[in-house]
Amino acid sequence: MLKARPTRLLAATAAIAPLKGGRSEGALRIAEQRERLLSIPADKVERYRINPRALEILPTLATMRRDVALRDRVIALAAAQADQMSWATIARLTPWIYEADVFRKRVHTRARREPPQAPLPRWLVAHWREALGRDEPAEQLARSARQSEPVLARLLPALELAPGTPLADRVLSVALADRDGAWLDTQPYTETLRFIESSGAATDTRGVLLRRVVARYGGLARSPSALHPPIEELFSVARHLLGGWPQQRPGMWRGVPASALRVARWCERLQALQDSFQDDDRVASWRRWLRHIQRVDCVGEGIIGVQVGVQVFAEPREAPRVCRVYAASVWEDFCARQADSDTRLAPPRPDRKIPISDGREGVDAYIVERMGLRP
């Protein structure tokens, strides 16, 4: 193992044609300015002067937050030349370095003399006192902004504040922190799900909001028959954001109530049915048994096995005529042997064959009468 080499990867990369052209002019300017700043001793940055055009690069350099030496120099230079920068550059730069007191204080002093005006972003035009204030700027901005925009999904657009910046992340976190269930009931359901799914806001903040939505609404479905599209959509969003279903990522679902976890299991099984059968009528026929379905397997060339309790009901994906009933252990052994084989294996002898070409009443009757289960 220690002597292994990625020979196939090396061969593939060696075959890639060389890039044509060079780096873009913008990338070269940014890299050049970065190296120039890093070459200046930290105690001399405040006395360093660059022209207004070069100052426009500072917001881009400020996004490189992991480079501590560069960040310190960006803050020192921005604070020293706060009066020389355009308000447009300040509007792009502040969300990345708003925590820097020295920079914020100097921009605040300038704003008192020369208040920012439209078409600058609303967070700077209408809320510069809060955003540039001395104490807790993000917290003050969040509390002020949500008075005029109570819908969390619309807060950043209303402020014209770009998601993904440290200021935006903190504003959303504060706006959500002390909200309760009654507040959640006032939020537009579909719009909130879209915000959680694809807003670009910090994953941690979206995760907090998602868990609150799941906790409040996810357990309302008391039976599989109550699994309506809005609930299915909620758990689909949860699955994608949390990286899997509860059994796959239990840590990500920690804190979710048991009632919601039960519905999540139903949604997981329903998704497996939909992925396997791709036939609405057959999915609907199995949907009523979601409470008892343990797993859904697709084996070989389209044999679908649905485990209900300790029995497995296997049928072809296409043109089914007969449903074969197996003990779970027999079916699991067949699945394992087929996974290890390069050829298609014949299914084992079933315990029972149930005709299904004219309807599925026989399968339902078997589950009720032989297994003693109810939907």
Image (cartoon, helix red, strand yellow):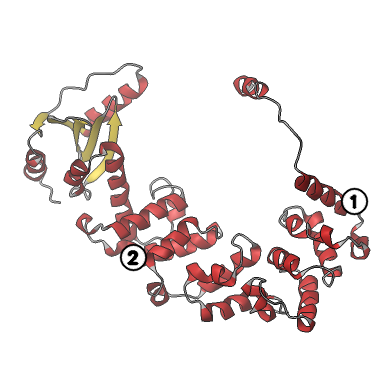
Please, is residue 14 above or below residue 212 in the view?
A: above
Which numbered dot is residue 217? 2
Left or right, 90 with respect to 37, comes to left
Between 76 and 16, the one lying in front of the other is: 16
Residue where numbered disc 1 is placed: 39
Between 306 and 1, the one lying in front of the other is: 306
Q: Residue at x 21, y 58 (%)?
A: 223
Kindly tell me whether residue 51 is visible in this rendering. Answer: yes
Amino acid bearing label 2: Tyr
Amino acid bearing label 1: Ser
Which numbered dot is residue 317? none
Please, is residue 48 above or below residue 276 in the view?
A: below
Could you tell me how far apart the alpha carbons at marks 1 and 2 are, in whole angstroms? 56 Å
In the figure, residue 22 lies in which quadrant? top right
- Image quadrant in which the N terminus is located: top right
Comparing marks 1 and 2, which lies closer to the viewer?
Answer: 1
Q: Residue at x 68, y 66 (%)?
A: 95
Q: Can you name the residue that lies furthest to the bottom here?
A: 112
